[in-house]
Image: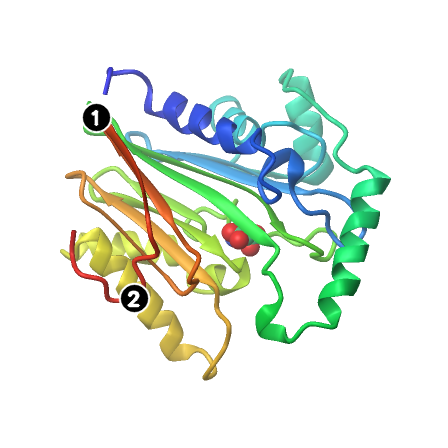
Amino acid sequence: QRGGSNLDAVEQGIWVTESAGDGSVGLSGGPNAAGVVQLDACIMNGPDHKAGSVAGLEGIRHPISAARRVMEKTRHVLLVGEGARMFALEEGLESVELNSREKYDLWQKQRAAQKSKPAEKKPAGHDTIALLVLGANGNLAGGCSTSGLGGKLPGRVGDSPIIGSGLYVDNEVGAAGATGLGENVMRYCASFLIVEFMRQGMSPQEACVKAIRRIIQNEPKGANLSINFVALDKHGRYGAAGTDGGFQYSVTMPGSSRVLPNPGIGTVER
Ligand code: ASP
């Protein structure tokens, strides 16, 4: 609104969640099966169509900043694991100890308790922030950050740092982002798909719904997909759709900020 940098808005917005201790993004994220928190993030800028990502990043407070540095300071798009960590440290990003023994023990206890519950009562143990920005200058940007799936195999990378899956920005059309089970998002390049649906003339809401329907069509009956999308177009229209009952999204415009309920599949146009 004040004409500042869209990328600053994305990065600083995501910092808030990375620092919030919500158990699935940044410092507080759930550890993998080896007891290690591995973080994934990406960022994308509309005007020059540049992108940066990090995956399996350990011990860095703000993975979104590492992703932005990859985009702005290297000729690469994606850095993983120890290479990503070394790069972030060289860039002077803050490092922290994420992998406490206590955290691992706690996760093991929770896991044992969950084993006795019926499948549908088990918490998903994952979440992501996907943040899309339309600046006063009419340009788009977006970012995504997560600790991925609690208990994932060491080295597992989900959709969130994969451009076109967890996030996609096209400055001529719009932007989309995802949260949910990364495996069910990345097999369909879902954020890219949603942006392409918008290019064909669909509203953000219609595009999110259509992407979910497309994926559901191909999946075995009753599969617990856990896929949720948000989208924003060049004109400032927005929409979302998800398969998770608890999925909410928030919309901030000049003078107002609202958290909206799960719009479900097929919710009417906003
Ligand atoms: N998409 C994330 C992943 O699979 C997790 C989530 O958003 O719930 O890594």
Q: Looking at the image, which is closer to me, 67 or 227?
A: 227
Whether residue 158 is visible here, answered yes or no, is: no
Left or right of 32 on screen, residue 225: left
Badge 1 element: loop
Where residue 127 appears, x then y in whole percent? 53, 49
Whether residue 109 is visible here, answered yes or no, is: yes
Q: Which of the two labelled residues, at mark 2 and mark 1, occupies the earlier sequence position?
A: 1
Q: Would you call the spot at circle 1 few (<14 residues within 10 Å), some (14-19), or many (20 or more)?
A: few
Where residue 209 appears, x then y in whole percent? 28, 63
Q: Which residue is mark 1?
A: 254
Where residue 92 appears, x then y in whole percent? 65, 15
Are the residues at dot 2 and dot 1 in contact (C-beta closer than 8 Å)? Answer: no
Q: Would you call the spot at circle 2 few (<14 residues within 10 Å), some (14-19), or many (20 or more)?
A: some
Q: Which residue is mark 2?
A: 265
Looking at the picture, does residue 238 appear above or below residue 256? below
Query: As shown in the figure, which amino acid type bears the numbered disc 2?
Result: Ile
Looking at the picture, does residue 107 appear above or below residue 219? above
Query: As shown in the figure, which amino acid type bears the numbered disc 1?
Result: Pro
Residue 97 placement: quadrant: top right
Looking at the picture, does residue 81 appear above or below residue 261? above
At 71% from the left and 36% from the top, the residue drawn is: 58
